[in-house]
Image (cartoon, helix red, strand yellow):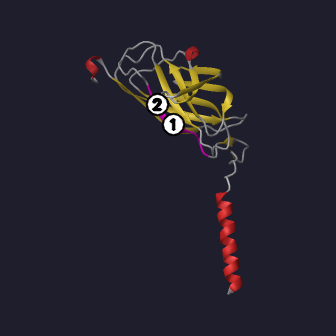
């Protein structure tokens, strides 16, 4: 009995010590065809704009993403695809920007390699010059030429891609914007 108690005491101490060790960095998922995906995809924290009235010129739509420490790969690229709205929203690609942090706690500015739009598919793609490391929060500001003329709900599917040559994009969720017509009401 003495040896059984000592064995379980030792087992308890060792297992507790292993549990308390810092968790190792998680590797990315590599699919059978060699495509790289996040072990845990980034999360869409918020989508917001300071101006919710229709027809306001030069507004910015802010999308805040959180890359979890367990992502396994850094964030390289984000696509925004408008999937609902009474009209297509046009973005001024050259004025797109990104920074660490949130809209209310803006950190250092992040360089972008490319910003490309596809009007036919209503998609805009933002590629970071330096991939965003796991454990970071980043906000992307998409500058519009003008808020839509028509009021209502406008939805954007947000998809993230890890760094690498052959990557799988993973949907992070839907960014929702509500625009109001004259007098603050929907028509």
The outermost residue toward the bottom is 1
Depicted 17 relative to depicted 130: above or below? below
Q: Main secondary structure of the magenta part?
A: strand
Residue 170 is situated, as x and y percent measured from the top left of the image, at 58, 39
- As for residue 47 lying within the magenta part, the answer is yes
**Residue in view at x 51 percent, y 28 percent:** 105
Could you tell me if the residues under marks 1 and 2 are in contact, i.e. CB atoms within 8 Å?
Answer: yes
Query: Where's the C terminus, which quadrant?
Result: top left
Residue denoted by label 2: 47
Residue 13 located left or right of residue 154: right
Residue nearest the observer in this picture, 17 or 55: 17
Question: Which residue sits at x=69%, y=47%?
Answer: 25
Residue designated by label 1: 44
Q: Residue 28's image quarter?
A: top right
Out of 69 and 32, give the one closest to the viewer. Answer: 69
Which of the 4 quarters of the picture holds residue 186?
Answer: top left
Query: Percent from the top left, x then y, of residue 33?
Result: 72, 44
- SS at mark 2 in the image: strand
Measure the alpha-carbon separation of dots 1 and 2. Answer: 8 Å
- Which secondary structure, mark 1? strand
């Amino acid at each position: 009995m003495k040896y059984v108690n000592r064995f379980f005491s030792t087992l308890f101490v060792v297992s507790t010590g292993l549990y308390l060790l810092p968790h190792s960095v998680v590797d990315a998922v590599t699919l059978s065809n060699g495509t790289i995906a996040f072990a845990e995809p980034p999360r869409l924290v918020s989508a917001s704009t300071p101006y919710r009235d229709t027809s306001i010129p030069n507004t910015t739509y802010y999308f805040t993403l959180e890359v979890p420490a367990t992502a396994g790969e850094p964030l390289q690229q984000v696509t925004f695809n408008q999937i609902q709205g009474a009209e297509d929203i046009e973005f001024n690609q050259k004025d797109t920007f990104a920074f660490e942090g949130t809209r209310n706690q803006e950190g250092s500015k992040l360089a972008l390699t490319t910003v490309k739009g596809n009007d036919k598919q209503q998609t805009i793609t933002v590629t970071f010059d330096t991939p965003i490391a796991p454990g970071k929060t980043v906000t992307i500001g998409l500058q519009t030429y003008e808020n839509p003329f028509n009021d209502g709900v406008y939805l954007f599917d947000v998809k993230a891609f890890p760094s690498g040559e052959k990557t799988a994009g993973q949907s992070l969720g839907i960014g929702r914007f509500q625009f109001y017509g004259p007098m603050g009401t929907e028509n």
